[in-house]
Image: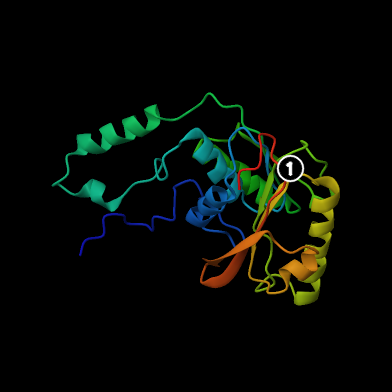
């Protein structure tokens, strides 16, 4: 067996600094794909941490190849022509789409996390596509009538106790229903009583694993600007 990757393929090459409980880049991308978010829609991550979900969404919208900014172990193999790697990267770069006007918003209450998120977005080449803010989600005003919220909030596994988590999810549910009434919401968490705390049963959910923790991806389908697509 040969390791052609080197570092794990979950690492895209833009996240040099980590904070507490980061979501893997590959899982963040999967959450965006499962939401069926489109580049012409507004996207909000109201608890963005170091910005991974927003960055992956921007990369998907721009058709930026995953791992374009990292190296692979196989690049040092003499059996593969070095020019092939250059040609493949050039082809990937030429396929990037810079024409779209993206509306991606990402915020977090932690100032340091937002600083890191901005650095990560710059490394990924999408710093112009995401509006980052230091802000409690309760203070966010809706940037549009329709849109999608994708969040990876604290689960209570390491960072908060059950009482605090329940209060957080209750407040987030109230925020979504009052300020983002026509939006779709997508929340991944391991908290078993999430729907009860959030105050609404999900349209559907899907079992996923985040860092070995069993989670559910709760999907609430709202109105869409161009019709219902879920």
In the foreground, 162 or 133: 162
- Looking at the picture, the colour scheme in use is rainbow
Q: Say which residue appears at 73% left-offset and 39% top-offset.
A: 146
Residue at the left extreme, as displayed: 79
Q: Say which residue appears at 29% left-offset and 35% top-offset.
A: 88
In the foreground, 208 or 28: 208
Residue 50, horizontal then vertical, whole percent: 62, 51
Q: Residues within 10 Å of mark 1 (few under 14, many from 20)?
A: some
**On the image, which quarter does residue 105 sit in?**
top right
**On the image, which quarter does residue 55 sit in?**
top right
- Any part of residue 195 in sight: yes
Q: Say which residue appears at 41% left-offset and 40% top-offset.
A: 65
Residue 24, horizontal then vertical, whole percent: 51, 58
Residue at the top extreme, as displayed: 99
Reading the image, the residue beneath label 1 is: 133
In the foreground, 5 or 116: 5
In the foreground, 92 or 51: 92
Task: Look at the image and tell me in which quarter the N terminus lies.
Answer: bottom left
Q: Say which residue appears at 81% left-offset and 64% top-offset.
A: 199
């Amino acid at each position: 067996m040969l390791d052609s990757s080197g570092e794990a393929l979950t690492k895209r090459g833009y996240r040099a600094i980590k904070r507490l409980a980061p979501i893997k880049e590959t899982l963040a991308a999967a959450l965006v794909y499962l939401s069926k978010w489109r580049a012409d829609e507004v996207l909000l991550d109201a608890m963005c941490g170091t910005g991974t979900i927003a960055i992956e969404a921007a990369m998907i919208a721009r058709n930026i190849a995953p791992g374009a900014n990292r190296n692979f172990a196989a690049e040092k193999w003499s059996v593969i022509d070095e020019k092939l790697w250059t040609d493949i990267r050039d082809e990937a770069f030429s396929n990037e789409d810079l024409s779209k006007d993206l509306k991606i918003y990402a915020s977090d209450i932690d100032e340091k996390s937002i600083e890191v998120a901005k650095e990560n977005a710059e490394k990924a080449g999408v710093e112009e596509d995401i509006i980052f803010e230091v802000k409690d989600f309760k203070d966010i005003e809706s940037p549009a009538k329709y849109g999608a919220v994708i969040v990876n909030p604290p689960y209570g596994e390491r960072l908060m106790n059950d009482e605090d988590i329940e209060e957080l999810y209750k407040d987030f549910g109230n925020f979504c229903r009052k300020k983002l009434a026509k939006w779709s919401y997508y929340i991944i968490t391991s908290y078993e009583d999430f729907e009860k705390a959030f105050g609404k049963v999900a349209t559907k959910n899907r079992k996923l694993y985040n860092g070995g923790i069993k989670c559910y991806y709760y999907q609430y389908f709202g109105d869409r600007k161009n019709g219902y697509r879920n």
